[in-house]
Image: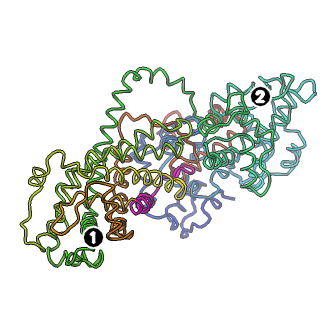
Amino acid sequence: MSPLSSVLPSVHCEAQDAPSSLTGSALNSVRNAVSIPENELKRWRRLFDTNAKVVVNGEKFLDTENFVNAIAPRGDLTKIGRPQFAMLFRVADASKRGLVSWEDFTVFQTLLKRPDADHWIAFQYFDVDNTGAISFDDFKNVFTANVGSSAIPFDFNSDWVKLYLGKKNGAHVLRYNEFTQLMKGFQGERLRQAFKYLDADQDGFIKPDQFKQIILELAGHKLSDAVVERLPTLCTLTLGGRISYSEVIAFHNVVREMDMVERIIREATAKSKDGRIDQSDFLNHAAATARYSLFTPMEASIIFHFASRGNGDKRLALVDFAQLLDPRWRAPNEESEAKAVSSSTSILTGIAQSAYNFVQGGFAGALGATIVYPIDLVKTRMQNQRSTVVGQMLYKNSLDCARRILRSEGFLGFYRGLGPQLIGVAPEKAIKLTVNDFVRGRAMDPETGRIKLTWELIAGGTAGGCQVVFTNPLEIVKIRLQIQGEAAKLEGAAPKGAVHIVRQLGLMGLYRGASACLLRDIPFSAIYFPAYSHLKKDVFQEGYNGKQLSFFETLGSAAIAGMPAAYLTTPADVVKTRLQVEARKGQAHYKGLADAFVKIYREEGFRALFKGGPARILRSSPQFGFTLLAYEYLHKYLPFPWEEKPPQVQTALTSRQDDMSRIRARNALKILLDVHGDFGHRAANFSPPLVRSPSSSLA
């Protein structure tokens, strides 16, 4: 029976001269494969040609090292070493000649397309004679060849082995499906036998160093060095200084269910108010998210024991669990020396980063302002309209205003005053975004990344207050330019430029209405930035299991947050506009902020304070939507080179998805390493010897 009938179940080929070997049959099947897209074959060919360094008779081949380069995952977050991927070379080298040809490589890549490729590769590794079945001797010989003499012995005459493989001289062999079930339970049997072997007194306890030996053999590739070093401390959970079988099994269950442990921790910390959880929170969330209980109290204690470095009663943040969840985790003090060198320049780095953010905020603000400027002009015209003055009701509503502007001033009339707006909006938006980021960064919990709502409001309000330095002069010039078209229509006045307006107002005049501007901008930013942050996090689930928001999710968060912020601050914006516009004949003059509020309310009613509110929403919502979108993407694709990012817990669960074939190759190795951690390191002792010269092997 050819194993390729299972590898390529849907492949068909025309009748030809029967190949003389299994390899020839495989090559013929692959050449005629119709299930493999041409573009996929081209990608495989490019991968093969890039790594194939051995050339024999004009044909390229992969040796062991180059084969590993071709199939090993990039940026793998496990402790599986690249040399251990050489185990898969024996599976790919179907001809046992020490080299992998293009045809061999295509067969191997096709095998990796199987949904169960990881188990199938492990099966082929044990099926040394390619019979499609694994006998008692096959399994024992492969295991023995890959395990060192110092390893804890395994009893192949145990009742558990006999249930799967029968007696040594029996006729029972394992087919593929039976083999997968054996491998699933094999580690548990090894654990049981190892504990029994080391428990010399048969009292149900072993020493801490013996526990460490067991775990290193069975799961050392799944644990960080920090956890491995602290394995003996498991004995401190109970009195006596030794470790019971129950504790060994509990620890093994935690390691085996580490993916579920990580999901529960990430979800529980994300829902926690302070970003931290204790053992009760962990168990409660585990019970709420599963049909049946997943973890026992002992297993929860073990998780928190290793995450907290001995103090299991503490409330822990996600970053505290990193050493348990990430096999590549390194202690912060291992990098402290490198950071200490640059600590003296941290102030300069902070200033440089703020300046960098300032420039990015300026570009983002200019883009947002340009997109929505026509809406802003309509809003200004509507807010300046006095309903008590006869003949001053030029526009019925915002739509009518836009129609009249287009008819009387043309399309360019919508962009009257855009120049000063762009000159001023860059520093305005830049300082708002920079100050908000600065205050949030200082108030944020460095471990959880959380910030209290009070500080979110303070950060936003401070940003809004700082921007008035640029906002007030900008807006008073912009508003007078926007009103000129309306005045020219009523009074026949000639339009005046921005320079003339600045000279006319003077330095103090440029800050007329600043109190109203502060009254508008401080609450606007205090509402906007917290709303934007919580929309991203709570509605669109940013950061949940490593999620990154899409283009439209980011735009939606920024735009929606601007709606309540814009409408609720409309009264202050109306007063600011009235104070900054040059009053014409017959119009009321306002002495100050309070006087303006009182007169508008008495003469025009409460609704007048919300004039232009819809237009303000239509302007502010998309403007801040596009501004924040641009700002986020500038940060994403042009980050500050020396930015000190908060600690992140990066694991296989949150890392970018690698090519599925590479993932399956890695998972196949995990199955083999679960048998014993020496698999791969000792594979050379079992693999067929490489040929002495490539030419002799292909002669």
Q: Is residue 20 left or right of residue 696?
A: right
Question: Which amino acid does the dot numbered 2 rest on?
Answer: Leu
**Residue nearest the viewer, comparing 593 with 317:** 593
- Determine the residue positioned at 50% across, 49% down: 656
- Mark 1 crowdedness (10 Å alpha carbons): few <14, some 14-19, many ≥20: many
Return the mark for residue 382.
Answer: 1
Q: Is residue 151 left or right of residue 84?
A: right
Q: Can you tell which mark lies on residue 195? A: none
Question: Residue 23 location, x and y as percent?
Answer: 57, 53
Residue shown at the point (45%, 43%) measured from the top left: 458
Residue 442 in the image: above or below residue 395: above
> Label 1 amino acid?
Met
In the rendered image, residue 556 lying in the magenta stretch gets the answer yes
Residues in magenta? 542-568
**Residue 534, horizontal then vertical, whole percent:** 51, 53
What residue does disc 2 label? Answer: 234
Q: Is residue 122 above or below residue 414?
A: above
Q: Which part of the image, by quadrant, shows the N terminus? A: bottom right
Asked whether 673 falls inside the magenta stretch, the response is no
Name the spot of residue 395 as percent of width and height, x first.
Answer: 25, 77
Is 209 left, or right, of 453 in this rendering?
right
